Image (tube, rainbow, N blue to C red):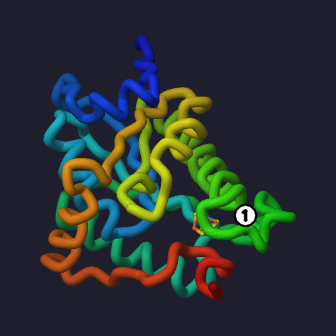
Amino acid sequence: MHLIRFNAKMESMKYQEHTVQRGTRILLHCCCGPCSTSSIERLRALGYSVELYYANDNIFPAAEWTKRLEELRKVAAFFSCDIETSPYNHESWRESVKGHETDSEGGERCSLCFSYNLELAAVHAQEMGITFFTTTLSVSPHKNSMTIFSIGESLEGFVPFNFKKKDGYKRSIELSNMLDLYRQDYCGCEFSRNR
Ligand code: SF4
C-alpha cells in the first residue's frame, strides 16, 4: 500500500480534515488514559479503526506506569479498542536520555523521550502489519506538537495529528471526568515529578 507522508507544516493548517476509507487501521501510541479519550474519538470520526499501544518507559515509578495503564484499559473498554503493551523498561529509557537529566521540561530530554516512544510505536506498528501510527502526546498543551511531528516524520507510517486543536484537550478532560479517570499531575519521568 502506498504510504501517506504528511508535511508537518501543511498538516498543522489542515490537520484532521482528511478522511480515510472506513476501517483503515491506525496504531495510537497512548501516553495515558485521559489523553487517549479525545484522540480515539477524533480518529474514529475520520474513519480509522484505532488500536492502542501503551509504550511509556519514561514513566516513573513503576506503580505510576501501572496506574496509568489501568486507566487506559478503562478507556479501551469504553471505546471497545484493542490494546497492547510494551514491557516496562525504565532503565533503557534512562540510558536514552543520559546527560539530559537536568534539562528543563520541553527541552532536549523531552525530544529524546518523544523519539524513544515513537520509535517503539513505529516498530510495533510494523510488527502488527499496521500501515499508520500516531500519538496522543500532542493532546497536552505542555508539549510542542511541531517538535513531536518533526521527530515522527522520520518514522515510516507516522501521521501527525495535532490533537490539542479544536478543543481536543478540553474534550479529553470532559471524557476523563465522565469515565472518572485518574489524571496525573506530572508528565511522567522522575525529573518532571521532582520539579
Ligand atoms: S518531562 Fe515528560 S516528555 Fe519530558 S522527558 Fe520527562 S516524561 Fe518525557
Q: Secondary structure at mark 1?
A: helix
On screen, 53 above or below 1? below
Between 132 and 99, which is closer to the camera in this rendering? 99
User: What's under tag 1, amino acid-wise?
Assistant: Trp
Q: Quadrant of ligand 1?
A: bottom right
Which quarter of the figure is the C terminus placed in? bottom right
What is the total number of numbered labels drawn onto the structure image? Answer: 1
Task: Tell me residue 67's x, y (percent).
Answer: 44, 82
Q: Residue furthest top?
A: 2
- Relative to 133, residue 111 above or below: below
Q: Which residue is mark 1?
A: 93
Q: From this view, report whether residue 11 is shown above or below residue 96.
A: above
Q: Residues within 10 Å of mark 1 (few under 14, many from 20)?
A: some
Position in image of residue 78 (x %, y %): 18, 66
Q: Does residue 104 appear left or right of residue 132 in this picture?
A: right
Residue at 84% across, 64% down: 98
Which residue sits furthest right? 99
The quadrant in which the N terminus is found is top left
Q: Position of residue 44 (x, y in %)?
A: 18, 43
Q: Residue at x 22, y 26 (%)?
A: 18
Which quadrant of the structure image shows residue 19? top left
Identified at 24% across, 56% down, the residue is 168
Q: Is residue 126 left or right of residue 171?
A: right
The image shows residue 109 at horizontal and vertical percentages of 70, 61
Residue occupying the point 32% across, 60% down: 36
Q: Quadrant of residue 139?
A: bottom left
Q: Is mark 1 within 8 Å of ligand 1?
A: no
